[in-house]
């Protein structure tokens, strides 16, 4: 047997076991459920056949109906009737809204027996009165919207017949909120234990069905976080959750039974919003799973469904429920789209099309069967819940199979990667190995990565390109090696890590923080000035340094021939920009506001703001020049003019150019050779020219 077939069988076993269990529960219900006797009431009267007093009866037909009056068995003015199942449209009210009372006289009961009457969910509220007493309620019937409290679940009433074996049942009912009023199912009458057993078996079956669907939904929802490359898994889970929620608010009303204080409005929203939500989620699921989408119908389906979903939240219930029929017609058209998409996938030989088409075919066949049942062409048994379960099982196995295939691909890639790593030439620095939390370079693998937050230093030799053009290749390499031999030990002294050499410069990380990065920069500048490294017939080298502080992603990349470390960080580029800015301001070191804020010893350095910027977070901050390396006299003059420079920079940022010019004039009065003040003075003169 092929590995693929084994995975399919193993993946489907749990779902198959659950399905067999649930269907067994469904088939092994108490035998009396298969012996339900259907009785038709005629003009408000029904007689229990002799010898069948212990059976379970489904009561339907003509009930007495008294409009605009409660607690009335029959209309005393003129006998009028209403159908159960049926709506107010079948009565003299002939309206969606209103109130009244249904009545039924039952004879032929066992006088000593205890019976139970099960009343399906009424729209919108009802109360059962037997022997003149209110026995049970669904909400509170009212004569208008203000006095009505809608119900959220079916109700059961236990009673004893009169000594003559008869009982008069009155059902008060009102509706001022729903799209229709009345009962959508027959009344169930039987011996109290038989009716109770029947309801409990229904509850167990539907609760198990909900548990399976909801468990599948949660499982695939969590799976989607580990299987992000297949986003259709997430939308499949959403569709399953919507179906599961819909199942618990309808018969046997699991949610209202568990949450006895559930508000009617919440119950209403869950009943109606779970009509468009599965359509929305399944439409997106089809697109993501098959990568097939026709933009116009796709957009229309999502737009109309979203609009109706929102309407259930914001519109009055009587309006949002009233337009449901129009959305149901639209949803039928959506089914056509849902069939065409996987059919197109089959034609294009998309991998998952067969699974999806099969699941939809099963669901549609069960829907057609239930439609024939509802029209009376087949026996009265609905199986749409079985069809939904089968469809979810098919799609679940599909997702598991796809996930298993992905895991197999990952395993194959890992095996290949291990073979590659055995022969890979490693060029990863030892310090990088430490940051990657590895004890040895042999433990480093392709794809290892870590997120860090630390300073990044960028350094570059001023005018090196022009200088190198005057030198021979050997002289260029000798100069660079002398320069790096001087600078690299200083970086290591402050626990810095040179991550990348870039010709005449490099980038370095400083895990010990901003103070280490700045002290290293100052010592590098002083060491270069003291050692006066110079190419033949040229002035000594000068370098510019920029430092920023931020998040970095450090990792390894490569291929079968070479592996290298890589750093991905916005601060990487900012540090380089700051280093380039040292040319503009004739500075030796420029740091960002983040470095300045991270310094523990700000007062022990000579630092002044030289540029006002707006950050990505829309915050205003300065860039700073560090002038520790200047002569003592220069440091003193810059310190004295520091305030004027700061005010001038701020004035330029505020577009107060005249005021800025005055501040820079004062700074130049103190220190005429101040390059920063001179730069801004020339800038202002060019603007005013």
Image (cartoon, helix red, strand yellow):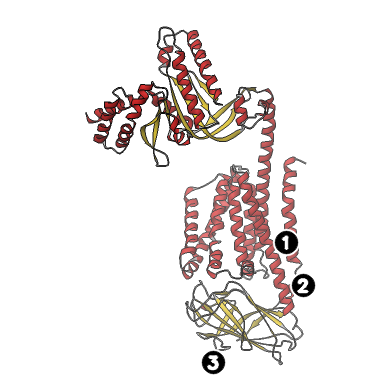
Picture coordinates of residue 650, whole percent (x, y): 32, 36
Residue at point 54%, 70% (across, down): 264
Q: Which mark is residue 22?
A: 1
Q: Residue at x 75, y 40 (%)?
A: 2
Q: Horizontally, is 65 left or right of 659 in the view?
A: right
Disc 3 crowd rating (10 Å Cα; few below 14, some 14-19, many 20+) is few
* Mark pair 3, 2: CA separation: 42 Å
Q: Is residue 386 visible?
A: no
Q: Residue at x 59, y 58 (%)?
A: 242
Label annotation for residue 76:
3
Q: Residues within 10 Å of mark 2 (few under 14, many from 20)?
A: few
x, y percent for residue 177:
49, 73
**Residue at horizontal 56%, vertical 23%?**
492
Quick one: 67 or 500, which is closer to the camera? Answer: 500
Quadrant in the rendering for residue 189: bottom right
Please tell me which of labels 3 and 1 falls first in the chain: 1
**How far apart are the alpha carbons under marks 2 and 1?**
17 Å
Q: Which residue is mark 2?
A: 31
**Where in the figure is residue 95, as x and y percent of width and height?**
48, 78
10 Å crowding of disc 1: few (<14), some (14-19), many (20+) = many
Where in the figure is residue 528, as x and y percent of width and height? 46, 17
Q: Is residue 164 above or below residue 555?
A: below
- Looking at the rendering, in which quadrant would you find the N terminus? top right
Please tell me whether mark 3 or mark 1 is closer to you in this view. Answer: 1
Q: Does residue 636 show up?
A: yes
Task: Relative to 312, say whether 91 is above or below.
Answer: below
Q: Quadrant of residue 585?
A: top left
Quarter of the picture holding the C terminus:
top left
């Amino acid at each position: 047997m092929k590995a693929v077939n084994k995975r399919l069988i193993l993946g489907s076993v749990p779902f198959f076991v659950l399905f067999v269990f649930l269907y067994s529960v469904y088939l092994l219900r108490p035998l009396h459920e298969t012996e339900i006797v259907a009785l038709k009431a005629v003009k408000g009267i029904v007689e229990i056949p002799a010898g069948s007093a212990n059976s379970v009866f489904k009561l339907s037909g003509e009930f007495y109906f008294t409009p605009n009056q409660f607690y009335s068995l029959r209309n005393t003015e003129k006998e009028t009737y209403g159908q159960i199942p049926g709506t107010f449209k079948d009565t003299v009210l002939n309206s969606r809204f209103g109130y009244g009372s249904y009545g039924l006289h039952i004879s032929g009961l066992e006088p000593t027996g205890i019976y139970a009457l099960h009343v399906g969910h009424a729209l919108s509220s009802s109360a059962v009165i037997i022997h003149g007493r209110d026995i049970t309620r669904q909400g509170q019937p009212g004569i208008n919207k203000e006095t009505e409290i809608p119900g959220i679940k079916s109700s059961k009433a236990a009673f004893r017949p009169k000594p003559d074996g008869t009982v008069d049942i009155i059902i008060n009912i009102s509706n001022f909120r729903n799209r229709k009023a009345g009962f959508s199912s027959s009344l169930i009458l039987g011996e109290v234990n038989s009716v109770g057993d029947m309801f409990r078996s229904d509850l167990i079956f539907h609760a198990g069905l909900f548990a399976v669907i909801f468990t599948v939904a949660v499982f695939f929802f969590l799976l989607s976080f580990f299987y992000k490359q297949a986003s259709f898994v997430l939308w499949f889970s959403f569709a399953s959750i919507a179906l599961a929620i819909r199942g618990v608010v309808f018969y046997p009303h699991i949610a209202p039974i568990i949450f006895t204080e559930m508000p009617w409005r919440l119950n209403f929203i869950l009943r109606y919003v779970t009509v468009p939500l599965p359509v929305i989620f399944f439409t997106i699921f089809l697109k993501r799973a098959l990568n097939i989408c026709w933009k116009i119908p796709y957009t229309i389906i999502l737009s109309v469904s979203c609009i109706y979903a929102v309407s259930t939240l914001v519109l009055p219930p009587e309006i949002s429920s009233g337009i449901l029929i129009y959305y149901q017609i639209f949803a039928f058209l959506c089914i056509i789209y849902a069939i065409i998409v996987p059919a197109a996938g089959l034609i294009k030989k998309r991998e998952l099309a067969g699974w999806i088409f099969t699941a939809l075919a099963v669901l549609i066949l069960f829907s057609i069967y239930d439609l024939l049942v509802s029209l009376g062409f087949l026996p009265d048994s609905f199986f749409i819940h079985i069809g939904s379960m089968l469809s979810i099982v098919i799609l679940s196995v599909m997702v598991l199979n796809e996930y298993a295939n992905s895991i197999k691909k990952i395993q194959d890639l890992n095996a290949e990667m291990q073979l590659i790593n055995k022969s890979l030439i490693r060029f990863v620095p030892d310090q990088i190995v430490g940051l990657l939390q590895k004890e040895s370079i042999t433990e480093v693998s392709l794809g290892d990565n870590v997120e860090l937050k630390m300073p990044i230093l960028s350094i570059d030799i001023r005018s090196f390109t022009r200088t190198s053009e005057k030198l021979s290749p050997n002289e260029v390499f000798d100069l660079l090696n002398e320069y790096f031999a001087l600078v690299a030990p200083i970086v290591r002294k402050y626990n810095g890590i040179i991550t990348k050499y870039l010709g005449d410069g490099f980038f370095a990380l400083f895990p010990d923080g901003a103070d280490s990065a700045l002290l290293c920069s100052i010592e590098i500048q002083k060491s270069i000035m003291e050692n006066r490294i110079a190419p033949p017939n040229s002035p000594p080298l000068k370098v510019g340094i920029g430092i920023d502080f931020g998040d970095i992603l450090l990792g390894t990349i490569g291929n079968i021939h070479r592996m290298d470390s890589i750093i991905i960080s916005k601060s990487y580029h900012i540090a380089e920009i700051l280093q380039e800015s040292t040319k503009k301001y004739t500075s030796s070191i420029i740091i960002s506001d983040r470095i300045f804020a991270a310094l523990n010893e700000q007062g022990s350095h000579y630092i002044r703001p030289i540029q006002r910027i707006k950050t990505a977070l829309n915050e205003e901050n300065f860039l700073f020049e560090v002038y520790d390396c200047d002569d003592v006299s220069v440091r003193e003059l810059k310190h004295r003019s520091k305030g004027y420079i700061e005010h001038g920079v701020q004035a330029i940022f505020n577009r107060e150019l005249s005021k800025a010019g005055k501040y820079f004039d004062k700074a130049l009065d103190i220190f005429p050779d101040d390059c920063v003040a001179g730069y801004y003075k020339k800038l202002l003169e060019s603007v005013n020219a």
